[in-house]
Amino acid sequence: MPRKEDFGLSPITWPLIDALTWIPQVVAYRVHQGRVKVPGGTMKLGEEGMPEIGASVGGKAVFFVTGSHVGTLSLSQRTVHQRLREAGADVWVVRSVAEALQIMADKYGASANCAPRPK
């Protein structure tokens, strides 16, 4: 059964995060957005339109949007992605794990090992 926080995510989001952890020079993480209940009210997690996956590659901020094969970016996504790029980050819309790993190899010289990094 999917986790509650997985509803609305692309099916490649978690496999991509797992695949990125195989690359020694990469730290990857899930970017959460929306609001959660906390004692005394709610807390905002992240801005609407943020990419689902963030990564650090040799000190460079890289974000991945794991979109559908036919989807288009919303206005909030386009706005946030432009702001991220203006701040020096790279933002990629990918449709598969293989596409993202190819970007990592081609653009950042970061490629996967044969085995995942120890956790």
Image: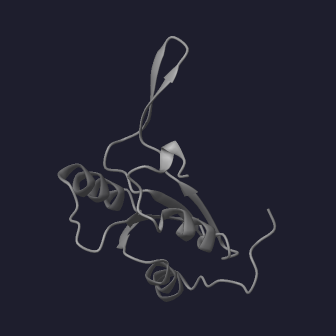
Q: Which residue is pictured at 33% across the width and 62% down the height? A: 85
Q: Which residue is pictured at 66% across the width and 73% down the height? A: 25
Q: Which residue is pictured at 57% across the width and 65% down the height? A: 17
Q: Position of residue 4 (x, y in %)?
A: 50, 43
Q: Is residue 26 left or right of residue 82?
A: right
Q: How many marks?
A: 0
Q: Is residue 103 left or right of residue 119?
A: left
Is 3 in front, or is 20?
3
Q: Quadrant of the C terminus?
A: bottom right
Q: Is residue 13 left or right of residue 47?
A: right
Q: Position of residue 53 (x, y in %)?
A: 48, 59
Please determine whether, in this image, residue 45 is positioned above or below residue 77. Answer: above
Rendered image quadrant of residue 63: bottom left
Q: Position of residue 11 (x, y in %)?
A: 45, 65
Q: Position of residue 69 (x, y in %)?
A: 28, 74
Task: Give the colour scheme of this rendering.
Answer: one colour
Is 108 in front, or is 45?
45
Please determine whether, in this image, residue 82 is positioned above or below residue 24. Answer: above
Please, which residue is most extreme toward the right here? 118
Please determine whether, in this image, residue 97 is positioned above or below residue 36. Answer: below
Please, which residue is most extreme toward the left here? 75
Please, which residue is most extreme toward the top here? 40
